[in-house]
Amino acid sequence: MRRRLAAQVLASAVGTLVLGSGCGAPAAPTATGSPSAHKVSAGSSNCPADSAQDIIFTGVTVGHLKCQSVPTSCLQGQPEPAKLIATIPVLVDGRPATLTVSTGRTYGLPGHGPGAYEVPSSLGAGDPQFELQLADMTTWVSSPGGMVTVLTDDGTRVRGTVEGGLTGPGPMQVSGSWGCARAGA
C-alpha cells in the first residue's frame, strides 16, 4: 500500500515537473476531469444569439458549452408565477442531455425578481436548483450552497449565472452564464 502511494506521488511529481518545464507562459486553465469523464460538446462555432450559453463543466463531466443546438425556452406558469425553469439542451458524449436551471417557486412573486437564489441544505421540489440528466437517465443534482442568479429579465429574455457542485455518480462542478427566451417572445 505504501509503495503504491509512494509510486503515485512520485509519478505525480514527475508529471508536474515535465509538464511545467515547457517554454513561455503557463497555459490557461481548461475544464478537466478523469480520463473516463463524460465530454460536453461546445456546440456550433457560428452561434445565433438566442442559442449562446457560457457554461463550464468540471469533474466527471467536462467541457465548455458555448452554443446549444436549439434556443432555450423559459418555463413559468401563468397567470400566477411559479418557479422559473430554463431547460438547456446539451450534447454529452455525442448524445442529447439536459441541464435544468431553476430559481425556485418564489421567482416572480412580489419582491422576488432578478437576484441570487441559493440551493438550500434540504432540497425540495420548489427550491432553487440545477441538474444535469444524460440520455441514459444518469442524473446529477445541485449540492447545498449552489447559486442560481437572474441578472436580467426584460419579459422576453432571461439571463443569469449558475455556480456550484452537483452530486451523482461522481463529483461535478458547473459554472457560467445561461439564458432563455420567454414563450411567445
Image (tube, rainbow, N blue to C red):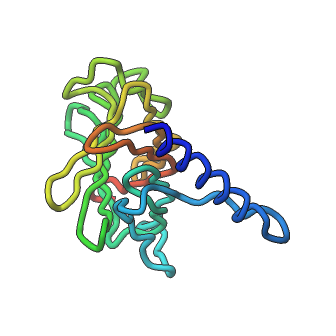
Q: Is residue 91 above or below residue 126?
A: below
Q: Is residue 93 above or below residue 11?
A: below
Task: Please state which of residues 109 and 180 is positioned toward the viewer in this rendering.
Answer: 180
Please, which residue is most extreme toward the bottom here? 46
Task: Please state which of residues 157 and 119 is positioned toward the viewer in this rendering.
Answer: 119
Q: Residue at x 62, y 50 (%)?
A: 10
Residue 155 visible to the viewer: yes
Q: Residue at x 47, y 60 (%)?
A: 53
Whether residue 84 sits left or right of residue 3 in the image: it is left
Q: Residue at x 28, y 59 (%)?
A: 184
Which of the image's four quarters has the N terminus? Answer: top left
Across and down, in percent, residue 39 comes to 38, 65
Across and down, in percent, residue 172 comes to 40, 45
Please, which residue is most extreme toward the left here? 136
Which of the image's four quarters has the C terminus? Answer: bottom left
Q: Residue at x 31, y 25 (%)?
A: 106
Residue 108 visible to the viewer: no
Across and down, in percent, residue 87 comes to 28, 53
Task: Please state which of residues 7 and 52 is positioned toward the viewer in this rendering.
Answer: 7
Across and down, in percent, residue 43 comes to 42, 74
Whether residue 76 sits left or right of residue 175 in the image: it is left
Q: Is residue 54 above or below residue 148?
A: below
| Quarter residue 165 falls in | top left
